[in-house]
Image (cartoon, rainbow, N blue to C red):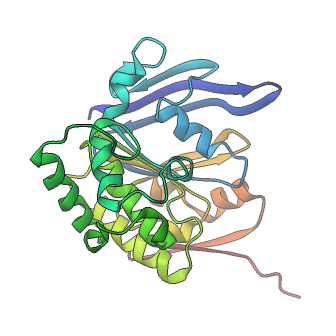
Amino acid sequence: MTAVVEIAEVTVRRGQSLLLDRIDLTVCEGDRWVVIGPNGAGKTTLLRVLATQIHPTCGVAGILGEVLGAVDVFDLRPRIGLASSALAEQIPYQERVDDVVVSAAHGVVGRWKEDYEDQDFTRARALMGLLRVDGLGERTFGTLSEGERKRVQIARALMTDPELLLLDEPGAGLDLAGREALVETLTALAEDPQAPTSVMVTHHVEEIPAGITHCLLLKAGRVVAAGPIRETLTAANLSRTFDLRLLVDERDGRWVARAERHQG
């Protein structure tokens, strides 16, 4: 199958800090990956490399058939959809929701004086329906709940019909009801054969939607394990990742992890 992401020996340093240490990863067309690890594991740094926001200190990062450092990233970025808290912070609270979504067609945050075609608005409305925010178009971004904002961001990330979709902790800050509503939406996306290849970052296995095919476990910038999710997301591997004896269970494509109880 065609490789959408192909990185080899990728290392990222910032000053004296080693954020990623010789990461190898191949994501093929149609894959749905989840990246799991504790705080400081390097998950968001890896996603920023995949989003072409930062270059590796060393190693080779191939994204959508191009190599970072040998391609104009501004030509590459429209082919990548990204939803992250950092991007959400750039969205003006007074921006109308339909403008938040449609403005992604021009690679900008918020409408200004860009010219949009009818097909842009048609696609934006279709995506908002898919993400169950079609009734919020007239609202401003600042009036939305956290869960609604997450879904609007994903609709925006899909606006350019990307070949690679990157989701950075989409469940962060949600209560149980909000998380489950979002996971249901992400499951529909993951199980849609027409949806783009995707990589999602999370701390919590409970946030993994059904339909995820592969898993990468990171700890202190290094790969603990990577591969098909049922072979990789094991109690032994997750325990090594979090330095805690854990039990892992999967049912109907959903995952649960809990600490192993000591028998006194």
Specify the quadrant that holds the N terminus: top left
Query: Is 109 situated above or below 137?
Result: above
Q: Is residue 217 left or right of residue 160?
A: right
> Quadrant of residue 112 in the image?
top left
Residue 135: give x, y in percent of width and height.
27, 74
Q: Position of residue 6 (x, y in %)?
A: 43, 28
Q: Is residue 73 left or right of residue 35?
A: left
Q: Which of 94 and 210 is in front in this view?
A: 94
Task: Provide residue 209's location: percent of width, then percent of height.
Answer: 41, 67
- Residue extending furthest bottom? 264
Q: Which residue is drawn at 33% across and 23% down?
A: 75
User: Looking at this view, is 252 or 130 the one in front?
Assistant: 130
Q: Which residue lies furthest to the top in this view?
A: 70
* Vertical side of 19 occupied by 144: above or below: below
Indicate the position of residue 48 as horizontal and vertical percent values: 54, 36
Residue at 45 percent across and 78 percent down: it is: 180
Pick whichever, 76 or 156, lies toward us.
156
Query: Which residue is pictured at 58% across the width and 62% down the height?
Result: 234
Residue 59 visible to an observer of this rendering: yes
Q: Nearer the viewer, residue 88 or 186?
A: 88
Quadrant for the C terminus in the image: bottom right
Q: Residue furthest left?
A: 118
